[in-house]
Image (cartoon, rainbow, N blue to C red):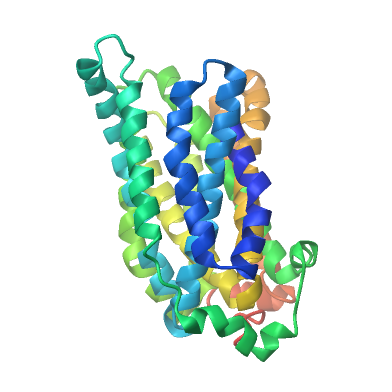
Amino acid sequence: MGCFAIGLLCSRTWLGKVADRHSRKLVILIGTLVAAIAPMGYLLVHSIVGLAEIRAFHGVSIAAFSVGYSALVVDLAPREQRGALIGYMNLSVPIGMSIGPALGGFLQHSGKQYIPDGSGYEVLFLISAICGVLALLLSSQLIESVKTKKKSTKDLSSSLVQRDFWQLAGDPALLTPTIVLLLIGLVFGTLASFLPLFVQELKLPFNVGLFYTIVAIASFVVRLFVGQAGDLYGRGLFISGSLICYIISMVLISQAQTSTDLILAAIAEGTGGGILIPLVLALISDRSYVDERGKVFALCLGGFDLGIALAGPCSGSLVMVLGYRWIFALAAILAFIALVIFVTQAGRNFSHSLRFALGKTSDIYSLES
């Protein structure tokens, strides 16, 4: 699982540059091609090292697709509808996350019927590879409009600014959302790593798969309207609300005694995730030029990837000492720190940051301002 995040981290910067210098479509094709190849690799390797290598290679698929796809959607979206369209186009994520685990379990179980001497995973990975091939075929039909391709050459303000990755990383307008995503990546990684073990320790009659299904449903529902609301009332208010949802979710899990507590935590976590990712993508799109947007997405989403990669090792070393409840309490503290950073650092000074985070003023870093 950690190697998947390593694959993401090691490829995002390069893929962001390719998206800016060549085309979004090329990066999307790279992502879908890797998604088609990687599942078959799991069937061919017979060692932990080989599995780790394939897993890291598989991480390139998400890195490429998320950067290319997000940049292309933003390029095609009118500024006044950017948040809404990002929210709508990202509905595919919770749909896939809700269907995938259940479908994977079904395919693994039913695969044994068709391959008696097999483990069932043969059918699972074959279907996964076929899905990747279909995604590749569909991606090959994408058409980047002439307007999108030539936009960076026509945009005078964009052509005057050629910032490299480290200059972008040092820009306060982009550094703050990157740090916020890093902290939430730690929260998300902790949740994914230790929730099943925590539920097992509690001895509750609760299917952990139900938790993730509820998360996906809540994320789907909130994405239907939050993007449009962000366009109307500003990104800051809703990003602040999403971080509060993460805090509530982690507090509920740390104090959970019943299945109802976990269901409420899932609703809060899904709501927070459904708001945060689309609105942060819209925020950093507002703050970046067209011909650097691939690098910007790679930077900010790389913060989220790094948080997920660090969560398992860092939290795992503390579980043996603190126990699961304190680990989720620590995750709540991390989400609270993310909220404090956003509320105090999202603008050029404390006063403006606070007003922006409460939806009382516009984004001073937006290129439209």
| Image label count | 0
- Residue pushed farthest top? 117
Estimate the x, y position of residue 288 in percent, counting from the top left. Answer: 64, 75
Let me know if residue 241 appears in the view.
no
Q: Is residue 233 above or below residue 331?
A: below
176 lies left or right of 240:
right
Estimate the x, y position of residue 259 in percent, counting from the top left. Answer: 32, 31
Q: Nearer the viewer, residue 217 or 98?
A: 98
Q: Nearer the viewer, residue 146 or 263?
A: 146
Q: Quadrant of residue 220?
A: bottom left
Give me the residue at 75% from left, 62% from top.
165
Q: Nearer the viewer, residue 200 or 35?
A: 35
Screen quadrant of the N terminus: top right
Let me know if residue 278 appears in the view.
yes
Screen quadrant of the C terminus: bottom right
Q: Is residue 29 above or below residue 311?
A: below
Give me the residue at 33% from left, 49% from top.
134
Give me the residue at 61% from left, 33% from top.
3
Estimate the x, y position of residue 16 in percent, counting from the top left. Answer: 63, 60
Give me the residue at 40% from left, 59% from top.
139
Q: Is residue 171 above or below residue 232?
A: above
